[in-house]
Every structure is written in C-alpha cells, then in structure tokens.
Image: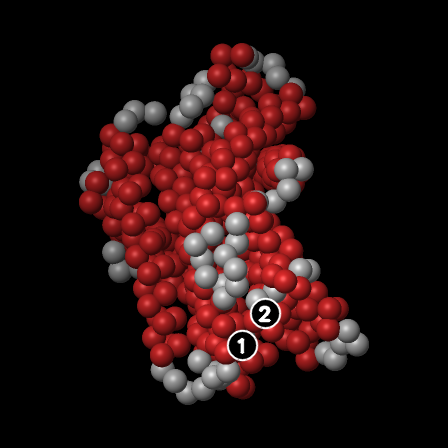
Amino acid sequence: MRALLLRRRGSLSEVLAVIAFAASAAILATVLGGVLAFAGRAGDPAQQGPDGIAGMLLLCAVIATALLVPTAMTLGASAAKLSLVRRERDLAAIRLVGGTTGQVAGIAVLDVVIQALIGAVVGIGVHLAWTPLLTGLDFAMTPFTVAELLPPWWAYPLLVIGFVGLAAFSASVALIGVVVSPLGVARDSRTVRVSLLRAAVWVLVLIGFVAATRIGYPDEGVAIAVLVVFMMIVVGGVNIIGPLVVWLGARIVAAVAPWPSWLVAARRLAADPRSGWRSVSGITFGLVVAGMLTLMSLFAGSGDDPTTMAFSHALLTGGYLTLGIAALLAAVSTGVTQASRVIDQARTYRSQHIGGADLAQLHRARIVEVVIPVLMSSVIATISTLVLLSPVLSGMTGSIAPVVQYVVSGLAAYLLVALAVAVSAPLVRRVALTSA
C-alpha cells in the first residue's frame, strides 16, 4: 500500500495542483494586506489624502476584494478536486488490495491537504516577494510602505489553516463524484449530473442583487455591507450557471455538428460540462472585472476639482490593479485546467489515436472543446456585468470609448485562452503516443 501512496509522486498533475494552490494563496494574502492597508490609512487623519479619500478607497478595496476572493477560493477548490481525480486509479488500487472506504477517503484528503499546504507556503513566499513592487502604485496619497501592505504576522498561519481546511473540505465533497472502486475506474463510470435548478438559482441571485440595490437602508454601512455580500454572491454565482450553459451549448452543437471533430468535442463536453466550465471560469471573472473597470473609466472623467481628480486617478489605479490580479487568476486557472483536462482524458486521446484519428484531428476537437465554453462564458460575463452595473446604468454617457475598452479586454481574454491551449498542446501528442 505504501508503494501505491508514493506512486507518481511529483508528477505533472501534482505540480499543476500546487501551482494553482500557490497562486490562490498569494492573491488572497495580497488582497488581505491591501484592504488592511487602506483601513489603516482611513483611520489615521494624517494619512487620509486629499479630503479623506482613503475612506472612499477603502470601500473600493472592499468591493475589489468581494470580486477577487470568490474566484481565488474557487481556484483553490478546483485544484483540490483536480488533484483528487488524478489519483482515482491509485485509490481504486488501494481498495483492491484491501483498503477500507475510510482509509481511502483519509488517504485522498491527506494527499490534497499536503499539496495545499505546500502551495499555501509557496504562495505566501510569492506574496512577500512581489509586495515591494506594489509600493510604487500611486493612490493620490503618500506611497504605501511594505510594512503597511503586509498583513500582521498572525494572519499568515490563519490563512494557511483556512486554505488547507478549504482544500480538505473540497476534497471531501469531491470524493462523492470520484470513482474509487476498481470496477468503476476500469469502466470510467463517473456520473456527472447538471440540474436545471442551477438556472433558477442564478436568476434568483441576480434578482436578489437588483432588489438589494433598490431598498432604502437606515444606515450607509449596512447598505455597503449588503451590496458587497451580494456582489460576492453574483460573482460566485457564475460557477453555478456555467456548467449548465456549457452542457446546453454542447448538446446543441452535437445535434448540428458539421464535422467529426465538432461532434467529438461537443459530446465530450456534454459528458463532463463542469470540467469544461472550469477551464474558462477564470476568463469569465476577468471579463466581469473588465466591465467594472469600464464603469470606473466613465467616472474618472466626471469632475474638475482636485479632490475628484485625485480620487478618479486612485480609482483607476486600483481598477487596473484588480484587473491585473484577475488576469493572473485567469491565466493560472486556464493553464492549469487545460493541462489537467488533457491528462484526465489521456486514455481517450490514446484510444482515438489508435482508432485512426491523427494528431491534427485531436487538436481540432480540443480547440472546439474550448471554443464552446468560451462563447458561453462571454454571455454569462456580459449578463453578470450588466447586473452589477445596473444601479448606475442610467447615469452612463453615450460614449463609445467604454465599449471599445470592454471589447479589447474581451479580446485579451480570448488571447489568454489561446495561449493556454497552445502551451498545453504538446501534452496531447505526448498522451496520444504514449501507452497507458
């Protein structure tokens, strides 16, 4: 049994999981440090900047956190699930040699926890390394120091514990959908269900957000807290509707597919829409943040007094920083999940190649398998952005510049997906030409 535990230790799939955990931990630590830095400035009258803009920027930082945290946590949870699926054959072998269900579950969760712990430590190291670079950002105040941007020392152990706990919980939940019996693995009988209730839940979330923006609150702090919570729910909610939309799109394409590669890709997506959605969920979030940045650019030009101009400049700086972090999340999420999908489907690629499909056909099918979720994610991102901006849509101007900015951001997101596909393309050849 010990040999099975050590089998393929250090493989590419485990490296990908650690990278995802590290990126998620680094971003969470950086975002936490930024919010605490703005909170410290807002509480110090001597450091608040022109007319106390630190307080307004603190609100913006909290909103940015509401956008970033759900996606960073989703990346960590996805890494746990991907790591677990990669090991299902080894877990089934442990069952075959006499391991109990409890032992298999314990080994599986422990495996993910170790990877999460390594990733969290690496991520905190990355956070400490890049924090000095953030001191050069101009928020129309005295530049932040490294000490201000770093959370207190006791926050790091709590972050690691929370991160490992999230990974353990995600792995435990994922065990429900992972086959751990020898016969189940041999037949690849993993069941993936996508319920239409996802659409109902997403619609209720959007309606709830719009309703929350129309309610009069007795206290401004309560209003801000409610809106921030709903924004987090809306951003996290795209992962609820995403798999369903991908499944519907794949079924439609499968019904009208003009070429074999399209049919293969559509059926593969329909069989596992959640995995297909995970490969583009980071891009969806990036498009939502791009929409928020479009709103900020509209407000940046409204006002000529020094305070408004300073606040607008600081707002744009924070917006571009948020978009940069979102792009990093999207890049890691897309690259890791694309490579993981190839590894997960290694036997399928090998079987298709033996059956007569050449490498060019395999690559075309994989491209279609990415294009369908990307198009679906664009629709979801646009709807989510319009809902998030609904409280201020009536005050927007008719300028075409924001539309151009959003389109450019969308094209950049598509380029990111294309790069992820290109980087993981050599894996297709490797798994297709390598015997199982």
**The C terminus, quarter of image:** top left
Residue located at (45% from left, 39% from top): 129
* 313 relative to 158, above or below: below
Q: Are marks 1 and 2 in contact (CB under 8 Å)?
A: yes
- Using residue 418 as the reference point, say whether residue 285 is left or right of it: right
- CA gap, disc 1 and disc 2: 8 Å
* 104 relative to 376, above or below: above
* 247 relative to 395, above or below: above
Residue located at (38% from left, 30% from top): 12
Residue located at (55% from left, 12% from top): 1
Circle 2: is it few (<14), some (14-19), or many (20+) Cα within 10 Å?
many
- Using residue 261 as the reference point, say whether residue 288 is left or right of it: right
Determine the image quadrant of residue 197. Answer: bottom right
- Using residue 159 as the reference point, say whether residue 401 is left or right of it: left
* 172 relative to 316, above or below: above
Question: Which type of secondary structure does the marked residue at label 1 adopt?
Answer: helix
Question: Which type of secondary structure does the marked residue at label 2 adopt?
Answer: helix
First of labels 1, 2 by sequence position: 2
Residue 336 on image: x %, y % = 41, 42
Amino acid type of the residue that numbered disc 1 sits on in the rendered structure: Thr
Residue 352 on image: x %, y % = 29, 38
* Residue 344 visible at all: no
Residue 307 is marked as 1
Q: How many marks?
A: 2
The residue beneath circle 2 is 53
Amino acid type of the residue that numbered disc 2 sits on in the rendered structure: Ile
Residue located at (52% from left, 54% from top): 144
| Viewer-proximal residue among 362 and 254 | 362
